[in-house]
Amino acid sequence: QAKGRDFWQSPTLVLHMLLHAVLAGAAVFALVLLFGQAGETWTSFVRNTLIVAIVLNLLVIASEMLTPHPTADARKAVQAIVRGRYRGYFWVLGIAIGNLVPIVLAWIGGDAMLAAAGAGVLIGLYATEYVWVRAPQDIPLS
């Protein structure tokens, strides 16, 4: 775990966590809207919140992955996420299913599309957090 601290001490971690909280909340509301009655104003608010949060999330992830990290261990963690063992979780589940597909579905509109976007976001959040926790821990201590 000591090697993972370098990656987890990123200045963007607070933004990352706040955005994930907003994304999770909007995603759950998007799913709940499918089973209940809500006005167009609330549905639009949930849709717009989801879209804006996804865009901001992608920007924070890009900055985390593209900016140089100060230590070799943090750089190894980024490589494991982007090109290594966790690339499938990151690119397919985290980025594609968790961000890109949901933003398109939310943009298209409709309650079913919005609910599907919410489900995709929750899958992506799980995958991203899994990768963020596991990749730095895989770096050998010696």
Image: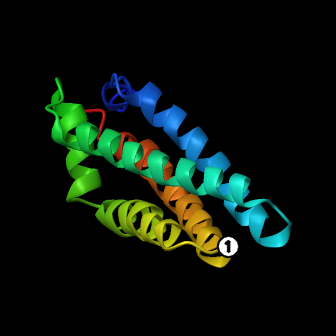
Q: How many marks?
A: 1
Write down the residue under mark 1: 111
**At which x and y percent is residue 54?**
44, 51
Q: Taking the image as drawn, is residue 1 in sight?
A: no
Q: Taking the image as drawn, is residue 142 in sight?
A: yes
Image side of residue 6 versus residue 24, left or right: left
Depicted 142 relative to depicted 105: above or below: above
Q: Tell me what residue is drawn at x 36 percent, y 28 percent.
A: 12
- The quadrant the C terminus occupies is top left
Q: Could you say which quadrant of the image residue 101 lies in?
A: bottom left
Please tell me which residue lies in front, 12 or 142. 12
Please tell me which residue lies in front, 130 or 122. 122
| Residue type marked 1 | Asp
Depicted 114 relative to depicted 69: above or below: below
CA neighbours of label 1 inside 10 A, class few (<14), some (14 to 19), many (20+): some
- The quadrant the N terminus occupies is top left
Depicted 74 relative to depicted 25: above or below: above
Q: Could you say which quadrant of the image residue 104 lies in?
A: bottom left
Image side of residue 137 versus residue 17, left or right: left
Image side of residue 22 versus residue 133, left or right: right
Q: Tell me what residue is drawn at x 37 percent, y 68 percent.
A: 96
**At which x and y percent is residue 117?**
56, 67
Q: Tell me what residue is drawn at x 59 percent, y 59 percent.
A: 122
Look at the numbered disc 1 and give the secondary structure of its residue: helix
**At which x and y percent is residue 132?**
41, 44
Depicted 15 relative to depicted 60: above or below: above
**At which x and y percent is residue 17?**
51, 34
Q: Could you say which quadrant of the image residue 115 lies in?
A: bottom right
Q: Tell me what residue is drawn at x 70 percent, y 53 percent.
A: 41
